[in-house]
Amino acid sequence: MKILVCPLNGPRPVAEFAYGGEIRRSPDPDTCSDAEWSSYVFNRSGAPGAKYEWWCHIASGFWFVVLRDTTHDVVIATFPAEAVRRGLPPP
Amino acid sequence: MMHRLDAPAGEWLDRSGTLRFTFEGREYQGYSGDTISSALAAAGVPYLARSFKYHRPRNILSFANHDSNTLFQVDGVPNVRGDVTLLRDGMRVSAINTFGGLTHDKARVLDRFARLLPVGFYYKAFHSKRLFPRWERMFRALTGLGEVTLGAAREATPKRYGFCDVLVIGAGPSGLSAALAAAQSGAQVALVDEALRLAGNGAPQALVRAAHDSTSITLFPATVAAGYYADHWVALASPSRMTKMRAGAVVFATGVIEQPAVFRNNDLPGVMLASGAAQLLARYGVAPGRRVVIVAANLDAYVTCLELSARGVSVAAIVELRSAPERDPAVAACVALGTTLLPAHAPYEAIHGPDGTVAGLRIAPLNAAGHLDATSTRRIDCDAILMSVGWAAAAQLFLQAGGSTRFSEELQQFVPQDLPPGIFAAGRMNGVYDVESRLADGRRAGAQAAAHAGFGVPGSAIVAPSVRCPSHPFPIIDHPQAKNFVDFDEDLQVKDLENAAQEGFDSSELLKRYSTVGMGPSQGKHSNMNALRILARLRGVGVEQLGLTTARPMYHPVPLKLLAGRSFYPERRTPIDAQHGSLGAVWMPAGNWRRPEYYAVSGESRAQSIDAEVHAVRSSVGLIDVGTLGKIEIYGPDAAELLDRVYAGRYSDLKVGMTRYGLMMDESGVIIDDGVIARLSEQLFYFTTTTGGSATVFRELQRWNALWGLDCTLVNVTGHRAAFNFAGPLSREILGALTDIDLRDEAFPYLAVRAGNVAGVAARLMRVGFVGELGYEIHVAAGRGPDVWQALFTAGAPRALRPFGVEAQRVLRLEKGHFIVGQDTDGLTDPHEANAMWAVAMKKPFFVGQRSLRILQARGPRQKLVGIEFAATTPLPKECHLIIDKGAIAGRVTSVTHSRALNKSIGLAMLSPDLAQVGRDIQIRIDNGDLLAARVAPAPFYDPKNLRQKVGSSA
Amino acid sequence: MSALALKLHERRDRLGLKGQRAGEWLAARGIVLPATPNTWTHPEETFGADALLVARLGQFEFFLEDGMAGTSLKRLSAALDEQPPGVYPVLREDWAFQLGGERVHEVLAQVCNVNFAALSLDSHPLIMTLMIGVAILVVPQSVAAERHYRIWCDPTFGPYLGESLGAVVIECGGSYTGVSG
C-alpha cells in the first residue's frame, strides 16, 4: 500500500487518508455561462500529470494539499490547506 | 517406481516416528518430517492425480509446490499443497478431479477423445447461447480442482503488519548472503523462503547457521512472498497467517524455476524435473526409481547423476540434447562411473507399462543442425525419467514490483534490466550460477539494499553472470501423435499452441488467454517459458521480442482464509445499546451502526409491534434513540457565515434559541444531506446530520472551512452525545416533571432550542416535528445517556410509553410526507424535484449548489417527489418498484407503508412531472408482473397543517 | 515483564479545547503545553492521581485528561463558562484503554499499521491513527522500563474496539478487563 507523508502525522499508509479530489479553480458563479459552470461541475481531466489534490488524514481530520505526479503516482510536495487560499503555483 | 532409501546425513526426516495416513482410502505410513508428497512417493504410489482435461494419471512433477499434480483434498480441505504440507498422523488424503476414485477414474476415457477438446474449446463450444448451459454444467463437473466443504467451520486467521529495513526473498546462497550483508550493515532483515526449512539450498552451512543465529534477521520459513504492492509492501503467506511486510528495500533472490523438456508422454508418472528428484533424495531419502534416465542439457544433470549414483540408484543413461556436454569434473566423474552418455540425442517419447507408469524412453539421434531423426529411434528401459534441460527466472514478483527484464541469448534466460528504487536482484535470477558467485552477488545486493534503507554504504563490485548456458534454447520435440505437454496443469500440448497461433492468437498475452497456458495453479511457472519459445519459433522472431507477462498479485495461490484474516467489522453502538437489548430490540444495520428496527414483545408479530409503537407516538408517547444522527458544533464569529455557504437555508438571521431545517447540496445541486441547525448563542451553532452522512459531512465542512479560512471551528460530537426523540401528545407533560426547562409553548415554542437539565443531567432540547407530534429531541453527554433514557422511560411507562425503532419512525415520517435523503432522493435529486425549495434561500450571495440549482430551475424538473395512496391494503408495491405509463418507465416508488392512523396505504414516489398532479391515477409494476393501481395524493397525509407538533400548552 | 493486559480505563474527566486562543488561554492558567502538535506533556511520567495529561492534537487543538483524583479539569471547565473568545470547549466522552505487558507489540502488529515497537518515546509522541478501522489517539508511555499504551476512541466504537482488541489480547495469552458503558 502506498505511503503518504502527512504534514501533521508523518508517513502513513494511504488507507489512513480520504481522497478529496483534484483541486480545481471554480469559475465565478455570478459571471460564468451555464456551459462553463456545467463543465466545471461535471468534467474532470483524466490526463496524467502533476496535479494538486485534497487529502484528509482521517484519524486527525487534517486536510492538506498534495502535489502528485499521477503518471508515476509519486508525491512531489505537500502543502497546508491554507496554501489553496493563498494561491498555489502552477503544477 | 519411487521408493525410500536408507537415511542419509542431513535429511529432513525423523525416522524414529512413523505416521499413519490414508490416501484414496488405503492406509500408508510416512515418517515424521515427511510432506504429503514425499510420503506418497516413498510409498511408491503410482499415481497421485488425474490431469485437468484428459484425466491422465499423474505423479510428482516439480516437488517445488508449483504444479497441480500434488494438490490434494485433505480432511475436507480442498487443494492442499502436498509438496509443502507436513504429514500428520491420521490424515485422510484423496486425489482431486476424479470420478469414482483415482485408479478407476471414469473420466479417463477423455484421454482418447482429445481431438474433441481442441485449444480454445471454451470459446468455441460456448459460442452457442442455446447450448451454453449444458456445456457449462458438464465441464464444471469434469474439470476442476478440489471440492469446497460448504459446512466447514470459519477459521479466524490472524493477519499481522510486519516491518523491516531489508526484505530478502529467497534463502538460497545469494539470499542468505544478502541477508547477512544487510544485517552486518545494521539493518533489520526479514528473510523469506518457500521451503519448510531454511537450509541454504547449497550454501555453506556456516552461513545458514549465521542467519539462524543473527538477532537482526527474522526468518520466515514455509512462506511465499505472494504479492508486491506500492512502497515495498509485500504479502507474505505463511501456513497459518498473512504478514503484510513493509520493507525499506527488497532483495529478490528468488532464483530460477526448472523447466521441463517437452516430448511425447512427458507427463507419465515417473517423469520428473531433476531438481525435484534431487530434493526428494536429499531431504526425504526417496529415490525417483530403480533405473533412471536423465534428459540433459546442462551441468545440473550430471550433478544429479552423481547424487543418484552415490545413493546407489542406477542411472541407465544420460540423454544429452547438446552435441557434447561442457568440460567439467562432474561430467568426467559421470563418465568415470561408467554412465552411458548419449550426446546429440533427444527423448522422442516416454513409454508406459501396463500400470500406466514409465517403463522406458524412446530416444532419437539429432543431426548437426539439431534435427531429430525419427527413423532410427531406440528404446531404453527405465522406471524414471528426470528432465534437466533448463531454468527460467522466478521473476513474477520482481515484475510486479515494477522491474523490467531482458532476454539474454547467452544464458537463454530473462534477467533483470531496470530496477526501481529500493528493488535489488541477486543470484541465479541475475544469471549468476556458481555458488561462489551467488554468494558474492548476494553480498553486493544486501549491502546496496541496506544502504538504500539508510544503513552502511553500498559496495560496487558487479558480479559477472555465468559463462555457461544453463538452459537449452528449444527443448521441445515434435511427435505426430502429440501428447507432448507444455502446460501440465491445463493439459496443453505443443499442437494446441500451434493451433492457437494459427488462429491468430499469436502474441504472448493473447496466446495465454485463448489457450489458457499459464493459467492453472502453477501460473505458468513451468509452462510460460516453453510456450514463449514455441510462439517465437512459429512467428520467426526471438524470445526477447515477445516478452514476459506480468502476473497479478497473488502470483502464487494463497488460501482464502489468509486473505480473509480475522474479519473485523467496525460497528458503532449508541450509549443506549444495552438498554435496547434488554427491551427486546431486533437489530438492523444503519450505516456502521446497529439500531433497533423495532422492539419485539412476546405475543406480538413484527407488524403488530411496529404498529403499536406507531400508535404510542400518535396517542400517548414514544421514545426513540436518535444518537446515530451526526452531531456537530460550530463556534466562532464566522460560524453563521460558514453555514450560510454550505447549507441551502439562511442561518445568519436565525435567532438565538431557535432551530431551522438544513438542506445540503453538492456542487451539482443534488441533495446530499439534511438535518436541524440550532443556534445556541451568537457564535455557537449545534446541528445534526443524517445517520449515514455524519462522517463525510463533517469532513467536507472541515475542507470548506480550511479552504475559505473563516474564523470558526468545527467539532464533531456525534459519538460523544446521546440523543433521543421523546414524542407524542403526552411528551410535554411527562418531560415537564423531569426538567427545569420551562416547556410551556410560549416559553419553548415549536422549533426552539433550550439548554437545561433533564433528570439532573445537562441537556440540549430541540422541539422538532419529524414524526409529526409534539416532541423534543434531547441531547446529553454520551456517558449520561443511559440515565436520562431510563428516567424518561420510567416516567413514561405508566402513561403507555413505548420505545420505538427505526421502522416505526419510517411510518411516522411517511405519514407526514417527510423524505429521507438517500431513500426518497437519489444521486440526481435536486431540491426543486423534492419539493424542498422552501428550505432554499436562493437570494443568498452564495451557497454550495446554488449556481447549478439556477440552471436546474430554468430547465425544470425531470421528476417530482409526490405522495401516492392505494385503494387496497394488499398487495402493496415494494420500494423501487417502477411506475409504468404507456408502456414506459415513468417513475419509481421510494417509500411505502400501511398507515393505521389514516386507515390506508400510502407512499412516496418519484414521478415524471406530467403525471405528478394530485388525483392522477398511476400504475406500478409489482413483483409478480401485475400492474397495481395507485393515485397521486397530497402530502403530508397526516395532520397536513402540522397542528399536532405545534400544539400549545393548553391542548 | 508484566503479563499482557488490556484494561478499559477507569472513568476520568476529559476535555478538549479548540480555537485560535486555546493555547494561550491554557498557558495563562499555568498549564505546561506541549510545544508541537502530536506530542504530550505530563507533570510526572507515572501518571499520578491528580496529574493532568495535556496532548496537543494540532496547532489549535488540545486534549486534556485529569488524574483519578484530579480537580484541575473541574476548575478549567468552570472558567470556560465565561466563554472566553477564541477558546471552544470540546465534549470528550472517549473510551480509554490501557494496553501493556508481554507481547504487547505482537498484539499491536495485528491491529494497527503503525510500527509502535520502533517508536522512540524521547519526544513524547502522540499518534492519531486507525486501529482495526477505528480512529484512535495513542500515547505510548514507559512505566518501569515497560511499554504501555493508552488508547482513546469515540465511545460509540468503544464496545467494538474493546471486544475485538480483547479477543486478540486473550489469544496472545493476556487478559481483558472491561466493563460495559
Image (cartoon, rainbow, N blue to C red):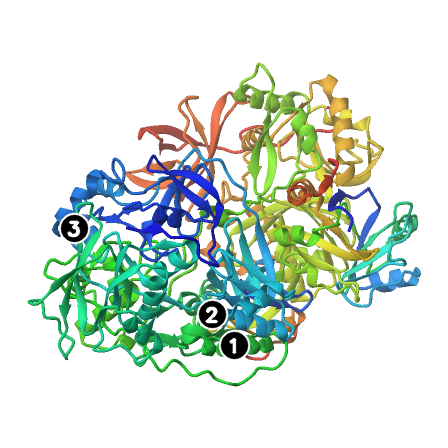
Kindly report which numbered mark, 2 or 3, lies closer to the viewer in this rendering. Answer: 2
Q: Is residue B745 left or right of residue C83?
A: left
What residue sits 44% from the left and 71% below the top? Answer: B402
In this rendered view, identify the residue nearer to me: B420 or B601: B420
Rendered residue at 79%/39% (across/down): B763
Residue B551 location, quadrant:
bottom left
Few, some or many C-alpha atoms within 10 Å of disc 2 (few <14, some 14-19, many ≥20)? many
Residue B520 sits in which quadrant?
bottom left
Q: On the picture, is B902 further left or further right than B495? A: right
Name the kind of residue labelled 3 in the image: Leu
Q: Which mark is residue B253?
A: 2
Identify the residue under disc 3. B117
Q: Do marks 1 and 3 share a subunit? A: yes
Distance between the alpha carbons at the discs numbered 2 and 3: 40 Å
The residue that mark 1 highlights is B445
* Left or right of residue B856, residue B489 in this image: left
Tell me the number on the disc at residue B79: none
State which quadrant residue B882 falls in. Answer: top left
> What's the CA distance linking mark 1 and mark 3?
48 Å
Please, what secondary structure does the residue beneath circle 2 have?
loop
Whole-percent x and y of residue A73? 50, 71
Q: Are marks 1 and 2 in contact (CB under 8 Å)?
A: yes
Same chain, marks 1 and 2? yes
Q: Chain of mark 1?
A: B
Query: Which badge, 2 or 3, is on the more N-terminal residue?
Result: 3
Taking the image as drawn, is residue B642 in sight? yes
